[in-house]
Amino acid sequence: MKVILTESQLNQLIQEEVNEANFLQSLLDTKSPDKLASKIVLGLLLGTINFTALPTIVSQVAENNPAVENVDQNGFLNRIKTMWRNAANKEAQITDQMKADAQQQAGPATEVSKDAISQICKWETRKDFGYQMQPKDLQGYYVKGENIKTYGYGLRVHPNGKYMQDIKTVWTQPELEKLFKEKIEKEKAWVLNWANKNNVTLGQGQLDAMVSAVYNYGRTGFLKTGVPALIAQNPNNPAIPEKWAHLSDARAKKYPGLATRRAEEANWYQTDISQNA
């Protein structure tokens, strides 16, 4: 007889709170081979037992449970494996559909995530937002070979487009914290405007990745990488994160943190491609 793990059976078994401590006893107390098979499948799905232990468990149950001692163990094992595959496939289909529904309901991303903002801060400062700034953060410092000062949060260009050092030479911590937030918002607005002009809908990971890259490269610099052109053609092109991850390879020897940043941005972007696949 073909046994199917129905939704009502699943709910009933979950309510019985099958766990590692009482799982074997629960099987010994089960008088129906069909329900026994369903319970074992549930144990496999919940991770209470694994396939390695399955033959031993079935043997123990057959030896101590009169209701199932005459059941052919090999046939019973095959039945369990078939039920498990069917249930696992159904569970995967439901999970995939739930992800698709959630993504559709969420719609296009319009705000940079808090996690991305926090990570951008760490990439720029190696510290969390609100860190106690040192004199060099407030007075600015020169990166070797450059004549433009960098201030706290990696700020070189004011949101109004002018170099920070050309506006004034010394900034306060509250001012720089405010400018960091403003710059994130400015770059987000630019990315969303670019996406709108190119008829591109961005998911959360895609928006986070692009804002981080624009914050680091600058708008013109990011456009020159060629990645935006690929996104405009097809934002779900799997070649995009692969290219993205290697954008800073040439500078990785001098600035290894850039390679790490590009790889993480590529992972953020890849998340939306995987969900849309």
Image (cartoon, helix red, strand yellow):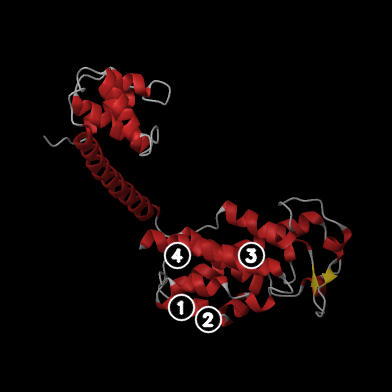
On residue 260, the disc is 3
Is 127 displayed left or right of 139 in the figure?
left
Secondary element at image label 2: loop
User: Which SS class for mark 1?
Assistant: helix
Give 103 or 108, whichever is nearer the viewer. Answer: 103
Residues 144 and 257: in front is 257
How packed is label 3: few (under 14 Cα within 10 Å), some, or many (20 or more)?
Answer: some
Residue type for callout 1? Leu
Badge 3 vs badge 2, beta-carbon distance below 8 Å: no
Cα separation, mark 4 vs mark 2, equals 17 Å
Mark 3 vs mark 2, CA separation in Å? 19 Å
Work out whether residue 88 or residue 239 is closer to the camera in this orientation and state it. 88
Q: Position of residue 80 (x, y in %)?
A: 24, 37
Closer to the chain start, of discs 3 and 1, is 1
Q: Residue at x 50, y 70 (%)?
A: 241
Q: Are marks 2 and 1 in contact (CB under 8 Å)?
A: yes
Q: Which residue is mark 1?
A: 230
Question: Of helix, strand and loop, which one carries label 3?
Answer: helix
The residue nearer to you, when weighing 207 against 28, is: 28
Q: Is residue 211 left or right of residue 14?
A: right
Q: Which residue is mark 2?
A: 226
Point out which mark residue 86 bears: none
Residue 117 appears in the figure: yes
Q: Nearer the viewer, mark 4 or mark 2?
A: 2
Amino acid tagged 4: Leu
Disc 4 marks which residue? 202
**Residue 18 point in image, percent of width and height:** 36, 25
> Which quadrant, please, contains the C terminus?
bottom left
